């Protein structure tokens, strides 16, 4: 009895279902695992390794060849293809410099206090006369 084997992993449910539709259109059996976990509790997506696209082990090589022929030209740039396995499910790692700049911009208003004051009890607003 044939079992299911992993064809690919996706972190975007829409992308997984597009590929699933292409495979089913050509008459192969395919299913998406962990979809409900990834949709309902999306922080688990990375921990689960994304959505798993599973095919029958007897059809794995045929489906892999089908996907290579269907996706002859990559949608992204040439750097979006893995040089090791020629896979196109590539994650663009965010820059730590961009994160640091975003953090500084987010906290910049806190570095420069104003003279405006608000009472948290009665919501009265006023300006302080002395240095902040």
Image: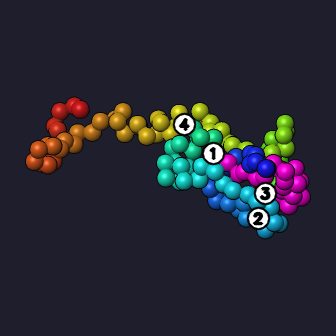
Mark 2 touching mark 3, by CB under 8 A? no
**N-terminal of the two: label 2 or label 1?**
2
Q: Give residue 32's position: percent from left, percent from top.
A: 66, 54
Q: CA–CA distance between discs 4 and 1? A: 23 Å
Which residue matches tag 2? 24
120 versus 76 height, above or below = above
Q: Which mark is residue 99?
A: 4
x 83%, y 66%: residue? 26
- Helix, strand or loop at mark 2: helix
Q: Give residue 47's position: percent from left, percent from top.
A: 57, 38
Which residue matches tag 3? 75
Of tags 1 and 3, the one toward the viewer is: 1
Judge from the rendering whether residue 129 lies leftward or rightward of residue 36; answer left or right: left
Mark 3 touching mark 4, by CB under 8 A? no
- Helix, strand or loop at mark 1: loop
Q: 10 Å neighbourhood of mark 4: few (<14), some, or many (≥20)?
A: few
Q: Which mark is residue 50?
A: 1
Residue span colored magenta? 51-71
Give 99 or 108, whichever is nearer the viewer. 99
Q: Give residue 57's position: percent from left, percent from top.
A: 81, 48
């Amino acid at each position: 009895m044939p079992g299911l084997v992993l064809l690919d992993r996706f972190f975007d449910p829409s992308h997984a279902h597009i590929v699933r539709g292409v495979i089913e259109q050509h008459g192969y059996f395919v299913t998406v695992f962990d979809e409900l976990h990834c949709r309902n509790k999306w922080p688990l997506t990375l921990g689960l390794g994304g959505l798993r696209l599973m095919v029958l082990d007897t059809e794995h090589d045929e489906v892999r060849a089908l996907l290579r022929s269907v996706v002859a030209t990559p949608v992204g740039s040439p750097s979006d293809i893995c040089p090791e396995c020629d896979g196109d499910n590539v994650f663009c790692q965010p820059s730590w410099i961009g994160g640091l700049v975003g953090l500084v911009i987010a906290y910049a208003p806190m570095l420069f206090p104003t003279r405006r004051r608000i009472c948290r009890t009665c919501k009265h607003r006023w300006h302080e006369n002395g240095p902040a």
